[in-house]
Structure formats: C-alpha cells, structure tokens
Amino acid sequence: MSNPDVRTGLSPVGHFGGSQWNGSTMKCYIAAAEASGAIFIGDVVDLAGAADDTAVYPTVTKATAGATAPIFGVIVGFDPDPNALETLHRTALTAKYCYVCVDPTVIYQVQGDSAAVIGASDVGTNFNLIFTHAGNATTGLSGMELDSSSKGNDATYQVTLLGAVDDPKNDISTVNAKWLVMVNLHRLFASGVNAAGAALAGGVGV
C-alpha cells in the first residue's frame, strides 16, 4: 500500500509528557522586508533578531533547512488580512502577524519525503527537514518534509524521530509515511536536546 503524498509541514499533536497539545502559541511578526518568500502554516521559523514597532512581538523568519540551523517554533496560524480573507499564508514581502508554537516539549506530525523509506530502526535518531516543495497557496499549508537522506546519529540535526503515526493506513514500509518528531535543535537549546543524536538504552535520548 502506498501512502498519499500530502505535505502539510509540521503539525503539533501533543506534548512529550503525554498530554494533548494545549494550543498555546506566541504571537510573532514577519516584517515586510523579510525576504525568504511565502511562509505557510506548518513552516518552521527562527528568531530574526528584532520586533515590530511596538517591541511587543518578536520578528521571525523562515528557518534554514539542514544541520546546525536552529528552530524557534512552528507557525500554526496568521492574523487574517481583511482585504484578502482567502489568503491563508504570508505572501512574499508582506508584513504579517503569525502565531508560533514555541514550546520545546511539543510533538509534531510530519511526512517523510519521497526519496527513501524511513523505518523502525531510525526511531530515536535525528533528522533534518527539507524544503523541496513550496507550500500550498490554496490551503495555506507548508510543503516541508522530513529529509530521509539525513537520517543518522548527528547531534546537529534539527528534529528527533519519536515514532510513526499510529494509523493502520500509515505504511512505514514505503515513502511518504507520517512520523512524530520533536525539535532537537531548538533556538532555546541550540546545542541540541538529543545530544547523542541516537536512541539511548531504554528510550529516546531526549
């Protein structure tokens, strides 16, 4: 059975302690001059080193894919534009307020890419994210995926693989399976949470 290739970026589903995600976010600001292009729900972002004019809301930028690039959080929504209510994402070179899940204990669902199979033996190791596909301007959802070519015991990788999504339709024997991850290289813990980059005896090394 093949998995449908439905990319939605990272979606918060729970906390490492076992509770459901409580919906808590931080309001942040994307400046008009932020030049990484369109930004979508499910995209990972990093702090941009400034704030809006009120100095209340920190600026964020789309995070960089790959090893050593930290993640501050994941966008879960935007303030609506009253002049373009159908636009569910941030268009390029447009100022936009967004809501970011920044809690480092949150578990996210993300799809593996189409390049190679990710399997049970990879659980507990670290991965990077890949931004090969653009987000969907109709749904407003991200095109970010788990980079299957990056799997390995590297403490500088961006996320830690916790396991497959428990769904009988989720076939881990083929590509595009859905996985659960936590941010390893969080901006608040930029040296890496899963410092070994690998599963520890008796559990995941977090």
Image (cartoon, rainbow, N blue to C red):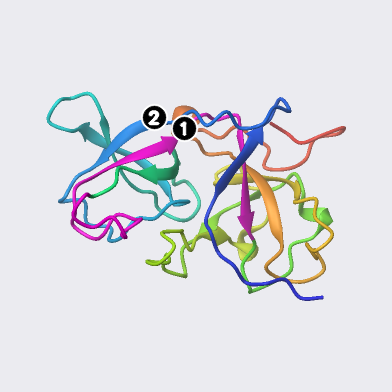
Inspect this view and state whether residue 153 appears. Answer: no
Amino acid type of the residue tagged 1 in the rendering: Val
Between the residue at mark 2 and the residue at mark 1, the CA separation in whole angstroms equals: 7 Å
Query: Outermost residue toward the left?
Result: 53
Residue 79, image x, y percentages: 30, 42
Nearest to N terminus: mark 2 or mark 1: 2
Q: Does 6 appear above or below 196?
A: below
Residue 50, quarter of picture:
top left
- As helix, strand or loop, the secondary structure at mark 1 comes to loop
Q: Is residue 79 above or below residue 164?
A: above
Q: Is residue 102 left or right of residue 156?
A: left
Q: Name the residue that disc number 2 marks.
A: 26
Q: Is residue 180 magenta?
A: no
Callout 2, which amino acid? Met
Q: Which residues are magenta?
A: 82-111
Residue 88 is one of the magenta-drawn residues: yes
Q: Residues within 10 Å of mark 1 (few under 14, many from 20)?
A: many
Give the camera-side residue of 179 and 129: 179
Q: Which residue corresponds to the image point at 35% horizontal and 56% vertical from the top-left?
A: 88
Q: Position of residue 110 (x, y in %)?
A: 61, 54
User: Observer-nearest residue: 73 or 127?
Assistant: 73
Report which residue position mark 1 lands on: 102
What is the chief secondary structure element of the magenta stretch? loop
Please indicate, yes or no, whether residue 104 appears anywhere in the rendered image.
yes
